[in-house]
Image: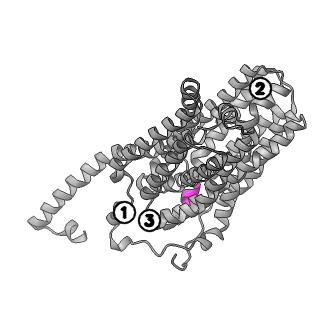
Amino acid sequence: MEAGACGGGAPAAGRRKGDGVTSLASATDLPRREFATISIVSAAHFISHLLQLALAPLFIAMRADLGLSFTELGVVLSLFYLFSGGGQVVAGILVDRFGAHRLLIGGMALQSAAIGAMGLAPDYLSLLLLGALAGLGNSVYHPADLSILSHKISPRRLGRAFALHVVGGSIGYAASPVVTGTLGLLYGWRVALIATGLFCLIVTVGFLLALPLLRMEGVQARRGPAAAAPAAPRFLDIARMPVVLLAFFYFFLTAICLAGMQSFGISALQEGFDMTLAFAAMTLTFYQGGNICGILVGGHIADRATHHHRIAMAGLGAAAVALAIVGFTQLPPVVTLCLVTAAGAFIGITTPSRDVLIRHAAPENARGKVFGLVYSGFDLGSLTGPIIYGALLDAHLTHAVFLAAAAPLVVAMVTVIGVRVRPKATPVAPA
């Protein structure tokens, strides 16, 4: 490259011209290709969340048809999240070893097939087995998606990329009750699950056409041998990093808050805040809408910020204050709606900066391991939160639900202080 830049012969000039044309074409093409990659990865996140909530709207019909209790059906979901959370750690290791695109498509196929097969399940044992398989399929998304985005997207656009990825999942959550609930109402719960699973399998096959936009080998190849990555750190080395442990607890704590709001927010508002069911449901809808808007705004902020930990801490703090006000007071329903919506927006603003912080904290050749490990904390928090909030509602401590949602956000602010600094590179043994 130096000879080409300094030499004056015709061949060198020819090379400069060719290189210039290639560079110009690449620079023009890059945003379009990046947008395509972001869209595909966000679509995968949509599929993940669509399938995650596919069962819940069908529980009443499944209970009547199979003779099961809600507790037994809840165990199917708990098994799903247990295998999803534990599987993320393994998925992160496999992402770094075999490639994120392979794990992503394999996980989508497994989860789609498992959910579809639930429509054919003859008994409860089959549901439990398929729930575990669906959880294993779901475990690949975060380590695979975020590894692909971290490698394929320019750092100056990463905040928006992470934001759109999260929004894709949020839209999947919103669409799932409508899709499976409507299909279940019209054709029965078995047809609803089979149709949803088949649709997602077809989308998975379509992803095979987009492999060039998902593969990360080309990124490494373009860096050349001079920029070859060092040996990948072992999983135990990753797990012992203080920054990774703090990130794990950050996800665990914020998931406890989110689990309470999403699963028990309507019940708490209806029982303790003089709201009708319709107004309580609308309040939660506004919360989710505020969260999505906050994520989109937070993506732009993250791309322009240099101190992402300050954004995360400020957003968590503001959300905690809003939820604490709801918990400590008995305000008019409209004011409560505004505070809950604001809390959702503040939490959303922190999300892209959170993912950028994790990306910077992760060694470049071990991002799958890091994302898999820290996101397993999210599933653990999602398992823990409902136990806490269910006990509070059983004791009729409805206001305490919002205080219990605010408290982990305050503690999570402390973890951000440690996540903000990327650890110095140290030589480690290969995986």
Residue 394 percent coordinates (x, y): 87, 37
For the residues marked 2 and 1, what is the alpha-carbon distance in whole angstroms?
Answer: 50 Å
For the residues marked 1 and 3, what is the alpha-carbon distance in whole angstroms?
Answer: 10 Å
Amino acid under disc 2? Thr
* Residue at point 68%, 55% (across, down): 416
Amino acid under disc 1? Glu
Q: Is residue 46 left or right of residue 320?
A: left
**Which disc number belongs to residue 67?**
none
Residue, disc 1: 217
What secondary structure is found at the residue carrying circle 2?
helix
**Quarter-of-image position of residue 370:** bottom right
Dot 1, how many residues are within 10 Å of its Cα: few (below 14), some (14-19), or many (20+)?
Answer: few
- Tag 1 or tag 2, which sits nearer the N-term? 1
Amino acid under disc 3? Phe
Residue, disc 3: 98
Dot 3, how many residues are within 10 Å of its Cα: few (below 14), some (14-19), or many (20+)?
Answer: few
Residue, disc 2: 336
* Residue at point 57%, 46% (across, down): 352
Residue 151 percent coordinates (x, y): 43, 57
- Tag 2 or tag 3, which sits nearer the N-term? 3
**Circle 1 or circle 3, nearest the eye:** 3
For the residues marked 3 and 2, what is the alpha-carbon distance in whole angstroms?
Answer: 49 Å
Instruction: Name the quarter where the N terminus is drawn.
Output: bottom left
> Does the magenta portion include 154?
no
* Residue at point 59%, 50% (across, down): 130
What secondary structure is found at the residue carrying circle 3?
helix
What secondary structure is found at the residue carrying circle 1?
helix
| Overall secondary structure of the magenta section | helix
- Answer whether residue 374 is visible to the viewer in this image: yes
**Quarter-of-image position of residue 223:** bottom left
* Residue at point 58%, 55% (across, down): 357
Which region shows up in magenta?
Answer: 357-361
